Amino acid sequence: MARITAGVASSHVPLLGVAVDQGKTQDDYFGPIFAGYEWTREWERQQKPDVVILVYNDHASAFDANIIPTFAIGCGEHYKSADEGWGPRPVPDVEGHADLAWHIAQSLILDDFDMTIINEMDVDHGLTVPLSMMFGKPEKWPCKVVPLAVNVVTYPVPSGNRCWALGEAIARAVESFPEDLNVQIWGTGGMSHQLQGPRAGLLNREWDNKFLDMLESDDDAVRYIPHIEYLRETGSEGIEMVMWLIMRGALGKKVRRLHRHYHIPCSNTAIGHIVLEPAA
Amino acid sequence: MTAPTEKQNIHEYLAEFDDIPGTRVFTAARARKGYWINQFAMSLMKAENRERFKADEKAYLDEWKLSDEAKEALLARDYNRLLDLGGNVYYLAKLFSTDGLSFAEAVSSMTEYSFAEYREMMNKGGRSPIGNRSIKGGY
């Protein structure tokens, strides 16, 4: 039987991908950011997940303004790195797990989550940067990936509560997949950042750390934070953190924190990273 | 924090967004208004379109259903104005990437700071949320 063994959350700032691709991860600027991922890279080498369900948002790459799916699941066999305006990142193609993805998609729809199904798409920095942060620069990614794209750009975006509930439903779907698979779920994006308008550059260390504390807690209060609070406290793009709640919801009531890292700044953004496992 | 007892009213939900200083939340109304600005920007994901755009920006823009105001703002790279016209930063990123600008440099152009000053602010911990959360509340 497949099982979700751990949850990982991480920012997915495009500049981190540039740092990896250009070999700058040890310099004065990026060194302290990447140092906070060393524990996780070693842990992932030991864990050897078969599949990662990777929750991210497409940044106007696979989806344009025409079609805006709230929750979309990639059910394809493979995905290429998107050209976001400066050429595709030089990273390996991402291999999907179509059997598991279709199983999750069907299960979620029966469980009242009306998913959009994607067969072919390119994946942008939202998905490839977390892979680079956790796995470095391999010739081939060490696991298969089920992309799960969330609209966090055009409002209304899904509520934190809905994201948490989707995570719970994903866990149920994974548990009913007959093959024996070690599955992780990753929530990406955030933490505080604002990329637009005169208020751009807003960061909020205190709020971000409170959010990390809430993720570690047995209490599920974090799912009820309203959008307006994310917007006021964490900048217009901090709303990406609702995607972390899909990861958290999939882990069950109690979790154990294995690792946590926070760093300001990377480009416009506060970097946050946490590794959790379900606790009985 | 507890579960909300009733469903949120869409009008009240949207009205709150106007109370955030220096921020244009990308609502459905903005998405409708800026549809062709954003679709134009998306077209720059293809290398051949970037080349055509760079060769003659005005001619390329004329191929799209854009208002004169939108074309002016695009040619001027006036990103705050483009936000007002319904542009979204993830779409506009295709334009500033075509220009060879980093996210931070393009973003800094929307603030009161030069890029160097903006970088310095970020390195010192970013813009404080204090006084920047609410126009009406002033907190």
Image (cartoon, grey):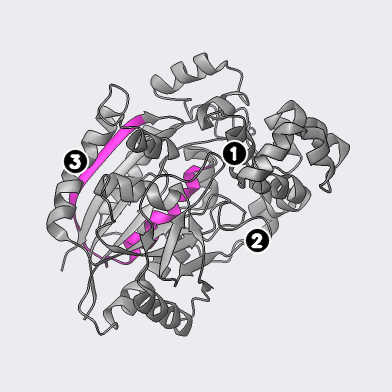
- In the structure shown, which secondary structural element does the residue marked by tag 3 occupy? helix
Residue found 51% across the figure and 38% down from its top:
A235
**Which is more toward the observer, A8 or A157?**
A8
Tell me where residue A137 sits by quadrant: top left
- Please indicate, yes or no, whether residue B1 appears anywhere in the rendered image: no
Chain for numbered disc 2 = B
Tell me where residue A80 sits by quadrant: bottom left
Give the number of the mark in front: 2 or 1.
Answer: 1
Could you tell me residue B99's position as x and y percent? 62, 30
Report the disc number at residue A38: 3
Disc 3 crowd rating (10 Å Cα; few below 14, some 14-19, many 20+) is: some
Could you tell me residue B55's position as x and y percent? 73, 32
Disc 1 crowd rating (10 Å Cα; few below 14, some 14-19, many 20+) is: many
Q: Could you tell me if the residues under marks 2 and 3 are in contact, i.e. CB atoms within 8 Å?
A: no
Q: Name the residue under label 2.
A: B9
Could you tell me residue B126's position as x and y percent? 44, 25
Side of A127 relative to A276 (left or right)? right
**Which is more toward the observer, A149 or B41?**
B41
Q: Is residue B108 magenta?
A: no
Tell me the magenta residue range: A237-264
Q: Which amino acid does label 2 sit on?
A: Asn
Q: How far apart are marks 3 and 1 (CA)?
A: 30 Å
Assign the N terminus of chain A to one quadrant of the image: bottom left
Mark 2 / mark 1, whichever is N-terminal:
2
Q: Name the residue under label 1.
A: B93
Chain for numbered disc 1 = B
Residue found 44% across the figure and 82% down from its top:
A106
Could you tell me residue B127's position as x and y percent? 48, 25
Q: What residue type is labelled 1?
A: Ala
